[in-house]
Amino acid sequence: MSDNQIIDLVNASERKDEDLYQEFLESRDREVFGILFRKYMALVFGVCVKYLGEKHLAQDATMEVFEKMLGYQPRSSVSNFRAYLFVIAKNHCLMKQRGEKVISINFSDADMESATYVHPIDEVNKKEDRLDDCLKQLKDLQKECIDEFYMKKKSYSEISSELHVTLNAVKSHIQNGKRNLKICLEAA
Amino acid sequence: MRRKSAKEAHQFEREIEKDAFLYEAMEGFEEMMASDIQQSLDELDDMLDDKVGKRFAFHWWQAAAVGGVVIIGASIMLLTGGNESPGISPSVAEEEEQVEEILVPDEVVTVEDTLNAVAVMDESDYGNAPQSMDYEAEANLISSPAEEAVVTLSDEIVTAGYSDEAARSDNLGSQAEPVEEEIAVLTEDLESLASDEAPGYSREVLEKSEVQPSAAKSMERRVSESQDVLQAAPIGGMTAYMSYLKSNIKTSDGMPNGFVTLSFEFERDGSPKKITINKSLCTACDAEAIRLVKVGPKWNAPNRKERMTIQVQFP
């Protein structure tokens, strides 16, 4: 290995993901991809646990994603590696969960879009006018949780004790509320 | 680490809501205990190392860096005529230490911290040890503010999991007895590790022999703490395992009295693998000991590469 290559590897954590991935695609060097993958491996693992429910299955799935990506050539250039990895990992785990034979990586543009999607209510400086209207149309608990969380800036735990619902229920209401808001915003 | 204020919690939760990848990963982790998460991540790290062939690459670097430091140290000694001023040697030592740390950060953190976590493994300290582990391991992941969130969320998981641990430790009270046995056996185990000459594993040996002094200390503390959640133990407890051995051993006439010492690593499902004889009694005895271990109860082994040593008594 040349000196430059060594220096590159050492600095890899500071380099942009997309550049590293591009370099990997050209060299197919396991070590290079290993550095990139390791950065997000915990996230991949967490997602696998979510869908597969069991630690060892999730570990296997994580390694399968790694192996798979070693051989994979994306159709177009990858502008957001992290989101791209998310889609691959999620799809792999979903197919594994359904018991489907996981042969190739296939995902649509829609998958990529949902992986990079940021809900208007989560965006910091954007004020979406129709948001207020759509908020009014939400069901009671969803509306309340979203109001407490986003407007009153309370934590899940505070909302949970105030509204006398479980922590998980708070999260669910927020998730469902956001989904309904999205539908409402897109319909208008 | 103090608990987060509501405001901090909210900030942190906002970050996660924005990020689908992080959100779903957190959903997965909520199902697991903090120690489990840490252990799984360590295992994954090893698994990735194997796939990337990292051992050999680092071996190269390590040799080069250690060589470089030796040259620096030697030239400093020559320059100062062999009388090192107090100011110099600590920094050389520090540099050596630093170099080793830089090159093998993952290994040192996992093996050493696992043992330290065992040492301080009583209820009041539970909040401290694993958290420092989390910080170190997760620091590798931090690439955005959202991912910094991963580090602090594990606090919540730790404190949430705390009550689980308290309940479990009651069940472990019955295991207090075999702890002393285990300690004798495990100190033997660490000693034999230090003398291991297997070339491919020299990096592991380097770290494990470094870990020995702190491990010896942590062994002593364990006698008084009597908690061995993170040490390898047979499922069902060591006492039960010993009686299993006693009741299932198949002796034949030629077998002398004495014992066989054997050691092994663990498969993912807790069954022993790579069983080797440390101290032989007779060929048939050794074979019988191996058979017993192979077909016997599986083990809970937090660190599957850490060899477990046991003795099988004959008759």
Image: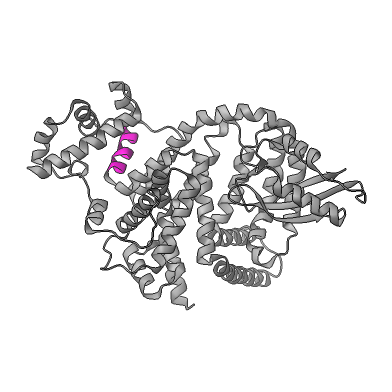
Front position in the image: B273 or B137 = B273
- Quarter-wise, where is residue B245 in the image? top right
The residue positioned farthest toward the left in the image shown: A188
Q: Position of residue B101 (x, y in %)?
A: 56, 58
Query: Is the image coloured rainbow, by chain, by secondary structure, or in one colour?
Result: one colour
- Quarter-wise, where is residue A12 in the image? bottom left
Residue A11 within the magenta-colored segment of the rendering: no
Front position in the image: A29 or B239 = B239
Answer above or below: position of B135 versus A85.
above
In the rendered image, is residue B1 in sight? yes
In the rendered image, is residue B142 in sight? no
Type of secondary structure dominating the magenta stretch: helix
Q: Which residues are magenta?
A: B6-17
- Quarter-wise, where is residue B169 in the image? top right
Front position in the image: B31 or B182 = B31
Q: Position of residue B297 (x, y in %)?
A: 68, 42
Q: Residue at x 34, y 44 (%)?
A: B24
Q: Position of residue B38 (x, y in %)?
A: 51, 45
Answer above or below: position of A168 versus B232.
above
Residue B8 within the magenta-colored segment of the rendering: yes
Say whether residue B188 is left or right of residue A9.
right
